Image (cartoon, rainbow, N blue to C red):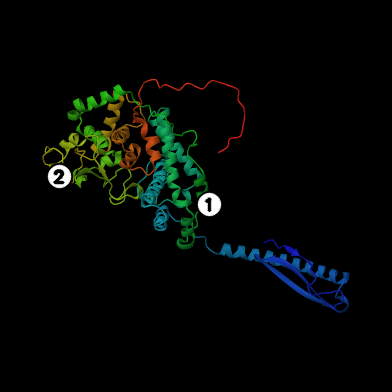
Amino acid sequence: MKITIWQRLRRGPTATPGERESQWTYRFTWQGKVRTHTTSITNELAGGEAAARRMTRKAALAEIKLRELGRADLADQEFRRRQKPAPPVPTLEQFLIHFERAANGVLNVNTIHSARQQLLNIVSKVGLAAPREPLSVPSVPSVLSSPLTIISRSLIETYARAVLTQAHAESAGARRLKQLQRSANSTVSSARLCFQNPKLRAYYRDIAGIELPKSIDDFCAAWPFPPRDCAKGRDYQIPPDHIIRRTFDDLEAVQRTRNPNLYAAVWLALTFGLRKGEIIGARIRDIQTRNGVTGFVISENWVARRPSDLQKNGQELPFIPAANDGLAHLAPFLLSAPSVASVPSEGIAGRRPEDYILSGPHRSCRTDYVWRDITRWMRALGWGTQKTIHEFRAYAICQVGMAAMRAGRHGLREAQVWARHNHITTTEQSYGRYFVTAIPNEPIPLPEPPPTGTFTPQLATA
């Protein structure tokens, strides 16, 4: 601890040249506090140079003593620190328990779940719990038993190598590689939420008694890939009209009977604007009628794995009205139940309301196989977009917006509400690529400019 003498000598405020007594004060800093020491000098030494010399010697001796005491105090603190056992390093499982307790009320429920899951995904992908096979995926219990000290910059670097290994195994092109890199950066960004919030750190330190390793700061500062190098572009590769027309013709003429799951998934996206995970979790009972309007109640999302009563953006069981005349196309996959009004009475025999709309002998038929079929089908038709099933959601959003525009309403605003976007800019910039503005292709007459003359500058008056 550094001892600093702020002021060695100062004549007392009540001292005058004729007084027989003076007070001298010097200040110093000790253990973080400013302290003062005052002494009085009387008789013949009350003033003049003799008193100043005497106080200078006293201050110098006091400074030496304080420095010695400071060194002794530091040694005593170091001794006590070494004698005190270091707190045990918690496992990942123990830390995540405290994280969920601390984040309750600080972060959104969906954010808590996502941050926890993404942190586990990173540790699982690099296989730190199984050092003999660095790229294997260990089981969840072995991941949870890993010490918290594994969260470091080296974890980010190993995770980046694992992503590149995956890209090499897939023989990924430039577009797919950028997609994997963006996904890795997004995963790390979500996992950092476990550590970055100051309120969470205060809870770990003061209530849970957890001292976060210094390596976590490096983890929060590093990226698997430079964000600028893998930034997402705005070139959506919109297909021309003839490809869109051919897609809908083939969907009705061929896929309706050849691949019913593909047909149902596409029309769920077109009718209700559902995302991939919402289509996977769509059940027959979710199509309901409220106040004479038939729509879809989202109760499951298999990609985000959200609880049934907590959906994206804090909404509870959102109700999406049917659009784009899609109910007639979905009728063969539904039941003739009273809750599904305006839907034809035909249906698949033996189906129950709790059954998933996408059917098959096992779960992979709706979680995996159908999406591969959609990708191959769209690529064969000439679609060059980065997304596949999500393009039909974007197309449906734009159709809802244009229908509102034709009716004289605010189309972009209605499209935002129907798509369940928090901000209208998301609808406009990321989904508005299929909007068609009705601008006549005719020359617009422009007024003739006035004849040119001499310009005379002058002040404008109201």
Residue for point 33% across, 44% down? 304
Q: The residue under label 2 is which amino acid type?
A: Arg
**Residue 257's image quarter?**
top left
Q: Badge 2: how crowded within 10 Å, few (<14), some, or many (20+)?
A: few
Quarter placement of the N terminus: bottom right
Among numbered discs 2 and 1, the one appearing first in the sequence: 1
Q: Examine the image and state in which quarter residue 425 appears.
A: top left
Q: Position of residue 143 (x, y in %)?
A: 39, 48
Kindly identify the residue that appears in the image at 13 percent across and 45 percent down.
Answer: 338
Q: Is residue 405 left or right of residue 58?
A: left
Q: Give the structural element (helix, strand or loop) at label 1.
A: loop
In the picture, the disc for residue 352 is: 2
Q: Residues within 10 Å of mark 1 (few under 14, many from 20)?
A: few
Q: Can residue 132 be seen in the rendering of this structure?
A: no
Q: Is residue 310 left or right of residue 338?
A: right
Q: Is residue 334 above or below residue 88?
A: above
In the rendered image of this protein, does residue 42 appear above or below residue 354? below
What is the number of the mark on residue 443? none
- Between residue 265 and residue 172, name the one nearer to us: 265
- Please state the horizontal and vertical placement of residue 299, each as a whole percent of the image: 26, 47
Q: What amino acid type is highlighted by mark number 1? A: Lys
- Helix, strand or loop at label 2? It is loop
- Which residue is label 1 attached to? 214
What's the CA distance linking mark 2 and mark 1? Answer: 55 Å
**Residue 239 rendering spot, x and y as whole percentages:** 34, 25
Residue depicted at 28% across the width and 42% down the height: 278
